[in-house]
Image (cartoon, rainbow, N blue to C red):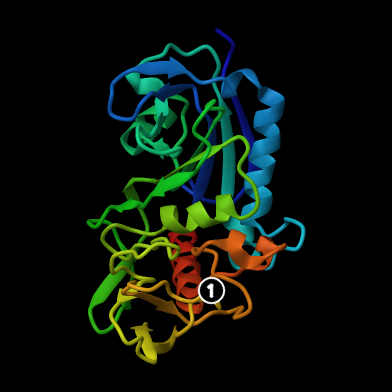
Amino acid sequence: MPDPVIEILRAGDTGKPNPFTICIVANPVLEAPWKSERFVVDAMPTNPALFSQRCQYVVDCLFGRLAGQAEKLLADPLIAPYVRIVSLLADGLPAEDANALAAEDGTSSLLIPRRTRFLPFLVRYGLTADIAYVISQSAEHNRASAFFTTDNDASPGIAFTLDGPTLTHRFHCLIPGTIAIHATSSSLTALHEFGHALSSYTNGGIVDLYVDSPVDFNNLRGRPVPGAFRTYNGVAYQSDPVRDGLSYPPGWQSYHCELNAPAFPAVMDDYFLSGTVPEACEQDKITRQFLRDRLIAKIGR
């Protein structure tokens, strides 16, 4: 069995023993289908050149370096120098539960991150993560998905208010935010899924805006759409009455926050509907501020 290949793609804050870390892993094994306990080897670890290229795509997407990309949250000079990114490729692992970081959904083309397997797998190689991507070369499932972070709510953090109640940007997690993407993923996929994964089950979740989603940090429900959206840390944000110019479909109850780039859909919406340049999409105003604050809290721990 070849030795695992671990590469430091960005050093991050070398002065800290546990800097904010993003891990990108070549998926060794797929559960096919999800929750079946049937496992097959994934081809991704046998293609190191492709894996390296895909890692570079993730980094470029996160730091706003794609052609025409407008959303550059992680390129913020208060954030970028402190983000550590590590890749891991381990080939030849047996097709068993502990090595399966992604699953093929049984009713769609979604790849599903098997979130509880990530930390034990990473610890095996001396790694840990706040956010973890797994890249698969599944033959049939090519849509990405993500799960929120499970915060360690017993750990310290930075408090914030949301419409009155106090929540906390926690410094540490119990389970990292996890993302499964395909080797063919493109455009803003890596950034969109990062928005989900960085958010929290207990301190604000960032949900999809291209479906009629439940209430969460960046999505509210009701008709007619009110002028006010939410008040985050004392700042009042307005609603988007026309959904990025796409319009809310008949029957929807969801409504969203005002945009930073009103001519384009939000990153958490269907950016491919923006026309010829989906990379021109940006996060809406409250989502960008929330993600920025959460990153700054974690890099400052």
Q: Percent x, y for residue 160? A: 33, 76
Query: Foreground residue, 259 or 81?
Result: 259
Q: Percent x, y for residue 218? A: 39, 71
Amino acid identity at mark 1: Leu
Question: Mark 1, residues whose alpha carbon is within 10 Å: few (<14), some, or many (≥20)?
Answer: some
Q: Percent x, y for residue 230? A: 35, 83
- Apparent side of residue 67 relative to residue 167 in the rendered image (left or right): right
Query: Foreground residue, 248 or 285?
Result: 248
Q: Percent x, y for residue 287? A: 46, 71
Image point 33% across, 50% down: which residue?
A: 173
- Does residue 13 show up? no
Image point 55% across, 7% down: which residue?
A: 1
- Does residue 153 show up? yes
Query: Could you say whether the residue bearing mark 1 is in a helix, strand or loop?
Result: loop
> Which residue is tagged 1?
246
Tell me: residue 39, above or below residue 165: above
Quadrant of the drawing holding the C terminus: bottom left
Q: Quadrant of residue 282?
A: bottom right
Q: Quadrant of residue 168?
A: bottom left
